[in-house]
Image (spheres, grey):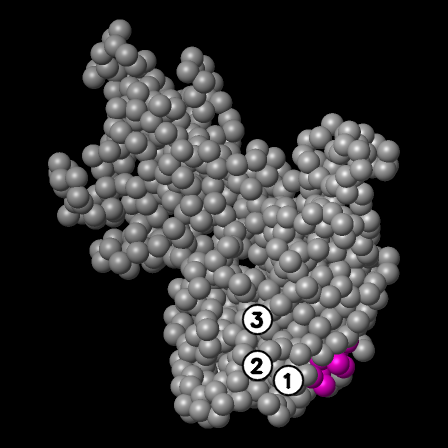
Amino acid sequence: MVDEQAALVFTIPFNLRAQRETEVLFPPPDDSVRDHLVKPCDTYDAVRLLLGQRTLPYETLTKEWRDHLRPDKFPEAREDLYNDVVAEATEEFLSNIRQKHEPTWEKGGPTSIDEHAARCEAIEELENLVRVIDPSWEMEEDPVRPIEIMLYFDEAHELVQRKAPKNDYDKTLYDVLLSVFNDFLPFPIFAIFLSTTSHIAYFAPTQNQVRSSRAAASGHLQAPITETPFDCAPDFLVIPGKLTLKEVAAVPFMAKFGRPLFWSMFRDIQKNAEVFQLSSSVLKTARSKLICDTDFEKFFHDPGATARLAVADVRLCLDYEPRRQQNQMVVAELVASHMRIAYSVPRHREYFRSGYSSEPLLAEVSSALQMIYPSLLTLFSQAAALQLQHWRTTHRTTLIDTLQHHMMNGLLNLGERGEVVARVLVTEAYDRAVLRDHLRNHDQRVLFSLGCRVTTFIKELFEDSIAQQILDSRPDNVADGLTFHEAFKDARVRFTHFAKLGDGSVASTDGLFAAFVRGMAFIAKTGQAVIDFLIPVLLRNELLREEVMTGILVQVSRRRTAGSTAACDIKAEDISFFSTSDPFTEDRRPYCTMELGVQPAVSEPASKAKKGARNLCPHDDTQTSPSRVDIKQAGVARGELRSAAEAQTKLVHPRYNIYAYGCSGTIYKGIMPEDKDTYVSLLASRDLLSEHPRSSDRAIAAVRRLKPSWTVGKECFHWIQNTSLGNVVDDEEAEGIVISQYGS
């Protein structure tokens, strides 16, 4: 960003990154400047050398100066300039300017002779530099004046972490540098401090915390600026009906979304061969930045916990509690080293809001980082593919284990664990389906952004016999509907990552058209809708537009009681899901609703009372399924959906309605028998009893006898004779699936 603005404003760049970090970050630091902050110097001589005797327009000067300091064009120019500047900042130089400015020094005043001489010399040299850059400049009092010189300090936290010598106010080098810039206020100079670390409160503290009396008197300081460019590539506009699936899955197209970092790399490339070669390089760059490892060719043997979390977060769009101190440290590391975006810093500066926005390219490399298949030797490059194979071969359950680790340590939002597990299941099913489709077609270059068939997705999400039942099912709101397989035989699903909705207005086929172009699924706003997330589906292999879009609408629910099933009754017509649909035209696009009851019923003893016990809940006549997979076709009352008469006068969209309950390999294809305990642990309630350190029946009964809450059972009601409230029976958790069909 600051490099691009250097083409518009004369800019002097400084990278203050510590030497210890240079092996993992780019660009390299300006060591000499970092080690010896700039003192009065003749920087303007370098400008004169560049100009010679020419007089250039300001716009031309800024671009030539920027090119002069670019390491790819003049590799040694920037380093030589700064080394010369630092070399001049010697004791001999200070002695010379001390003699020069001693006549204007007020002996016994607030500043020493050295400070006075340095300030006067710096102001004099700055004025000379400004006049070299713009000979027409004059000193004015006008507060609104154009900026002539821009300085930026990248990795500025290096200044914050170092205390200034010989000061009684605990000031840092950053404070000292700000004091220097205060002396430059009359000049058209502007400084930007860039940092990816969490020292936000120090860079711009609240008024009562500033370490400078001048800053405190000037009012509130501007909070750290997080409004950085995003989705700003040239020719960015997407026109419905102009793009194909293959085109939106191309690396140069995906690079247009998100930060300028990636699309700017394709800006000057014209030939197809160069585009193909650069695509591989861009993917490697994205991968290295996401996992914070710049050695593109080495295998990523043992990724740290934060790198794994970053990959999971890009795919799943996780939520953290920002006010927890330990969480702030983890999130700060994600922002500093793993491409997480800082959205906003509140006025109080106690924490910042951040997240992974929709960046298809980053999601693509995240997808690849989780796959293991040997056939992926054709992906990106052989080295990258072998690395991915090694990662997942040695740690097949990386994604779910990462979530369990951070759920247990309190980083992730416990209230959304069911939704997160559901997103894991559909994400891993999607990844397997993409490989199944494209490796079956012997594709030489697999990108997860290419999507997969909806039918393959169903086969990879559910256990084989269940998947076949779904593919053979018919809609539950129209008579004589096509089977699922027939209705979606040409349909494709495409989502490499999830993104949050701010409200329900985007939950439509218009919104899913946009989502399909970016390769994302939508997460509904918490507590706002009956739908938890929406997956975009392209019905036919045609040019992308709203008219060929539909979706899979997913609700994640907790069963009310052990073994109970729920009634998923999401109607597209009620939520205006089909944007351009006219109820009296032949728009019969199908859609699918799923209710994934992955979370078991809340362990409430009241739900286990014998029939004689008084039930405080409304009567529920839902039949309890047996403790096994029980695939049914549930009859749905037509009055609740669409009557035959209504179907004749008002066309409705065929709905394929699926309810799965349970979370094991008997339902979901991706859960191996050895994985079930991990899922159970991840989905378990985090209440007083579940977190008690002694989990034996005797220990739990003793805690219940303390009566932290009143529940059915002898622990609470042992003191009443002959009461049914003291008797409890156990219900088994059932697993199965209900496929709702019309009139059955």
- The image quadrant that residue 97 belongs to is top left
Is 415 in front, or is 382?
A: 415
Mark number displayed over residue 569: 3
- In percent of width and height, residue 36 lies at 47, 30
What is the three-letter code of the residue carrying label 1?
Answer: Gly
Viewer-nearest of discs 3 and 2 = 2
Label 1, label 2: how many angstroms apart (C-alpha)? 7 Å
> Circle 1 sits in a helix, a strand or a loop, which is it?
loop
Q: Are marks 1 and 2 in contact (CB under 8 Å)?
A: yes
| Image point (26%, 58%), residue name | 59
The image quarter containing residue 174 is top left
Q: Residue at x 83, y 32 (%)?
A: 699
What amino acid type should be assigned to the residue bearing mark 2?
A: Arg
Q: Which residue is mark 1?
A: 743
Question: Would you name the residue on which mark 2 appears?
Answer: 638
- Of mark 3 and mark 2, the one earlier in the sequence is 3
Mark 3 → mark 1, Cα distance in angstroms: 15 Å
On the image, the x and y values in percent for residue 625 come to 78, 66
Nearer to the camera, 545 or 357: 545
- Which one is closest to the eye, mark 3 or mark 1? 1
Observer-nearest residue: 284 or 625? Answer: 625
From what the image shows, is residue 326 above or below residue 666?
above
The segment highlighted magenta reads 466-473
| 3 or 1: tag closer to the N-terminus | 3
